[in-house]
Image (cartoon, rainbow, N blue to C red):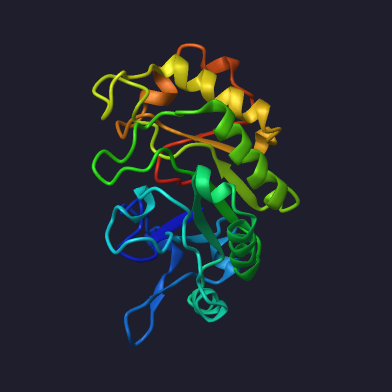
């Protein structure tokens, strides 16, 4: 799945563009368009759809319930540009508001049922949060609520925790966690919330490619079908 950032105030500003062979075209206004499905298969063409909180790159890190009041016309416009999947965000507070989850589901339905739902941690515009699971019961409850809404949609993947930078040396907020602790926490959430293993994605704890996949003692103990990905997500899902 190839991803582009939707707007400037995305919680994650890095975006991946399709490869040169994807034959991306532009309109007169130089807007990106996805290749036809026949050319893009087996990939979908996704956009990182941020919450509408704030007006800067820290919007997704602000505490409180996320605002996802995108209009049907906006989602239709995204479809006309060729986008066939989205990445949407939840946090603990948002997962506790059924009306917001319902609005997010309507957005996912509007792009054809393909999406990645990502859980963000403790909100902080200064530190981007602790980068760790601060409350396991709340995280499990949040994912349980998300799965109750999106569980019947096989095209929706679950990115268990956004940018888990708190599980390693030099984290933003002490005490820093460990990679073994990260794997333990992720497995506890997957099991506790009853998430399908083949729909789970685990971001790397570092932007240094390979730290997760090659430096994880005990990695083999994770579910065999669990997807392990760098962040931002780039996968043929």
| For residue 59, above or below residue 111 | above
Q: Which of 73 and 42 is in front in this view?
A: 73
**Residue 209: where, in percent of width, then height?**
34, 32
| For residue 215, above or below residue 229 | above
How many labels were placed on the picture? 0
Q: Nearer the viewer, residue 143 or 163?
A: 143
Res. 3 image quadrant: bottom left
Res. 145 image quadrant: top right
**Residue 111: where, in percent of width, then height?**
60, 68
Res. 101 image quadrant: bottom right
| For residue 129, above or below residue 235 | above
Q: Residue at the spot x=41%, y=64% of the render?
A: 52
Q: Which of 42 and 175 is in front in this view?
A: 175
Q: Which of 234 and 39 is in front in this view?
A: 234
| For residue 75, above or below residue 142 | below
Q: Can residue 28 be seen in this view?
A: yes
Q: Relative to residue 45, is residue 222 drawn left or right?
A: right
Q: Residue at the spot x=35%, y=57% of the render?
A: 10
Q: Residue at the spot x=59%, y=53% of the render?
A: 97
Q: Relative to residue 130, is residue 81 drawn left or right?
A: right
**Residue 123: where, in percent of width, then height?**
37, 43
Q: Is residue 237 visible?
A: no
Residue most extreme to the bottom: 28
Residue most extreme to the right: 152
**Residue 16: where, in percent of width, then height?**
37, 54
Q: Residue at the spot x=28%, y=27% of the render?
A: 173
Residue most extreme to the top: 217
């Amino acid at each position: 799945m190839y991803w582009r950032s939707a707007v400037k105030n995305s919680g994650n500003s890095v975006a991946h563009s399709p490869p040169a062979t994807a034959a991306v075209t532009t309109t007169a206004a130089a807007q990106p368009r996805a290749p036809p499905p026949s050319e893009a298969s087996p990939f979908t063409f996704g956009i990182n759809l941020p919450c509408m909180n704030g007006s800067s790159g820290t919007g997704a890190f602000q505490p409180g319930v996320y605002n996802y009041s995108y209009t049907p016309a906006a989602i239709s416009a995204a479809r006309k540009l060729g986008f066939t999947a989205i990445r949407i965000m939840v946090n603990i507070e948002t997962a506790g508001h059924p009306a917001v989850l319902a609005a997010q589901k309507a957005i996912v339905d509007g792009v054809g049922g393909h999406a990645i739902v990502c859980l963000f941690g403790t909100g902080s515009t200064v530190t981007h949060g602790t980068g760790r699971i601060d409350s396991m019961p709340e995280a499990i409850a949040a994912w349980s609520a998300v799965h109750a809404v999106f569980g019947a949609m096989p095209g929706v993947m679950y990115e268990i925790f956004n940018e888990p930078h708190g599980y390693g040396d030099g984290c933003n907020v002490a005490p820093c966690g460990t990679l073994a602790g990260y794997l333990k926490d992720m497995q506890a959430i997957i099991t506790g919330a009853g998430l399908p293993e083949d729909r789970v994605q685990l971001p790397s704890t570092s932007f240094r490619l390979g730290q997760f996949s090659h430096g994880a003692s005990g990695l083999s103990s994770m579910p065999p079908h669990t997807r392990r990905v760098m962040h931002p997500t780039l996968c043929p899902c």
